[in-house]
């Protein structure tokens, strides 16, 4: 693992090395994601909604967190690219850089990939907010990754049916400590959500009138973005042990935006993308044992949709991984999967997959993958080892932690996008 920001940062890696069994391999993890299906049938029945789930590929989710020696994380950053999100129906929107920072401002990347935080230009700066002078040929990047709220002297302007009207975009990251330090399997949990305005051209003023006075762009209700969440929301959950993490991300975005498409007949609507990333301080391939066995216990989380037209359910399950380093085989078992709510409804997101690791001494000795089926749905699963090789307990010398991602689907459109994280016993 080599992360922008140094040794205190754990990350997943900025690019996909290869896609195998439906799971993407990155330098420090594995990942999978799905897309909403509510916009696949035209005309779109509910432009404001984003529901359904289908497997997706081609995009990249880069996760970065700062992690202290005791496993506590801070400064989460979720970078999402090539997810098939377009404001103008022509080009991919600029990369999403989400940091859940609770103050107004802007974030960009420098040439090294490091994040740079700066102030937000005023709405009157039409050299920056150039939609006011260039229209759809304006610079899309200048309308991405801006944080407009909280702000003073210009209250949020919500529609009458939106009560209460939000005045902030995020409350930042929230923490819950697990019991893994005292022998349990419960991880630390960090969560964050944000209401965003990416792509909202009303961040800037219209061109000055004949007397040099500022104007409001067509469709606007005042100066600046009207309210937090005018174009969607994002969420990130991180379940972490000492060396490994399982990150779940969601982005809902307004696409085919009428201003950017340049005229009537727009198909403006919402769509969503949801993904799982197992990442962290990967065990060096040369350190993976060539013999012995190990058992890992942990948990699984993910999304399940019974078909392409239903709402998605978030689920929880238990994970067990039994490894034989001599045969290079690891059996990944995800069981007792049920909705993560009071109903605890069973969902068919279980697997019992015999996966295979790279050859001992190879550069993929710390990587495992296979196709899998649970009788109802089929797909694939991949995983990585995290942390140093340690001894003790019921297992032989083996990496401290293990995590992975998996996806399942069938011809009826039922889809699972999930991940797991486990500790050595």
Image: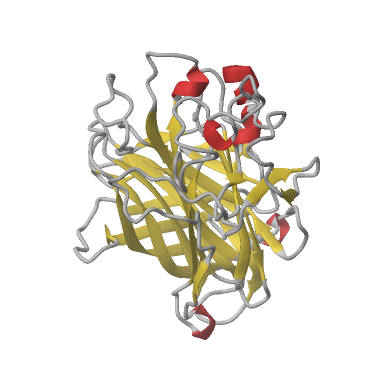
Percent x, y of residue 32: 48, 43
Image check: 286 left or right of 190? right
Residue at 28% x, 35% y: name it. 410
**Quadrant housing residue 55:** top left
Say which quadrant the N terminus sits in.
bottom right
Q: Nearer the viewer, residue 302 or 154?
A: 154
Percent x, y of residue 95: 61, 36
Image check: 105 left or right of 256? right
Residue at 44% x, 70% y: name it. 297
Q: Residue furthest bottom?
A: 182
Image check: 352 left or right of 201? left
Percent x, y of residue 318: 35, 65
**Quadrant housing residue 264:** top left
Residue at 66% x, 26% y: name it. 130
Q: Is residue 55 above or below residue 366?
A: above
Residue at 61% x, 30% y: name it. 214
Percent x, y of residue 56: 44, 34
Q: Residue furthest front?
A: 211
Q: Residue furthest right?
A: 111
Count of labels in the image? 0
Q: Nearer the viewer, residue 179 or 121?
A: 121
Image check: 389 left or right of 196? right
Q: Is residue 351 above or below residue 341?
A: above
Residue 322 seen in the current view: yes
Q: Is residue 154 above or below residue 231?
A: below
């Amino acid at each position: 693992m080599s992360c922008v920001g140094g040794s205190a940062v754990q990350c997943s890696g900025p690019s996909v090395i290869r896609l195998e069994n439906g799971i993407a391999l990155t330098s420090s993890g594995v990942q999978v994601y799905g897309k909403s299906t509510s916009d696949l049938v035209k005309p779109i029945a509910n432009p404001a909604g984003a529901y359904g789930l289908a497997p997706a590929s081609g995009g990249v989710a880069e996760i970065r967190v700062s992690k202290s020696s005791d496993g506590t994380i801070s400064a989460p950053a979720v970078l999402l690219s090539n997810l098939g999100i377009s404001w103008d129906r022509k080009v991919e929107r600029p990369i999403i850089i989400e940091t859940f920072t609770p103050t107004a401002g802007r974030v960009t990347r420098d040439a090294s990939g490091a994040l740079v935080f700066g102030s937000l230009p005023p709405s009157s700066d039409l050299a920056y907010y150039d939609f006011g002078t260039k229209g759809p040929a304006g610079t899309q990047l200048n309308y991405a990754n801006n944080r407009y709220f909280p702000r003073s002297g210009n209250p949020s302007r919500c529609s009458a049916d939106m009560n209460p009207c939000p005045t902030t975009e995020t409350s930042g990251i929230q923490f819950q400590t697990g019991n893994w330090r005292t022998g349990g399997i419960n991880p630390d949990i960090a969560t964050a959500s944000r209401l965003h305005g990416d792509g909202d051209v009303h961040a800037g003023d219209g061109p000055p009138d004949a007397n040099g006075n500022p104007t409001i762009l067509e469709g606007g209700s005042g100066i600046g973005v009207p309210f937090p969440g005018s174009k969607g929301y994002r969420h990130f959950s991180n379940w972490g042990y000492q060396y490994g993490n399982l990150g779940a991300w969601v982005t809902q975005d307004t696409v085919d935006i009428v201003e950017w498409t340049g005229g009537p007949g727009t198909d403006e609507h919402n769509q969503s993308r949801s993904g799982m990333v197992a990442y962290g301080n990967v065990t060096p391939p040369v350190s993976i044992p060539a013999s012995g066995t190990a058992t890992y216990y942990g948990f699984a989380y993910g999304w399940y949709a019974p078909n392409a037209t239903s709402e998605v359910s978030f689920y929880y399950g238990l994970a067990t991984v039994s490894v034989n380093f001599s045969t290079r085989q690891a059996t990944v078992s995800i069981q007792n999967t049920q909705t993560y709510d009071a109903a605890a409804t069973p969902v068919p997101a279980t697997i019992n997959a015999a996966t295979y690791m790279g050859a001992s001494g190879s550069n993929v000795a710390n990587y495992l993958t296979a196709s899998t089926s649970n009788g109802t749905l089929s797909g694939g699963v991949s995983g990585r080892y995290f942390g140093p090789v340690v001894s003790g307990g019921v297992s032989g010398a083996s990496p401290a932690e293990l995590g992975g991602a998996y996806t399942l689907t069938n011809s009826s459109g039922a889809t699972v996008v999930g991940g797991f994280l486990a500790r050595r016993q």
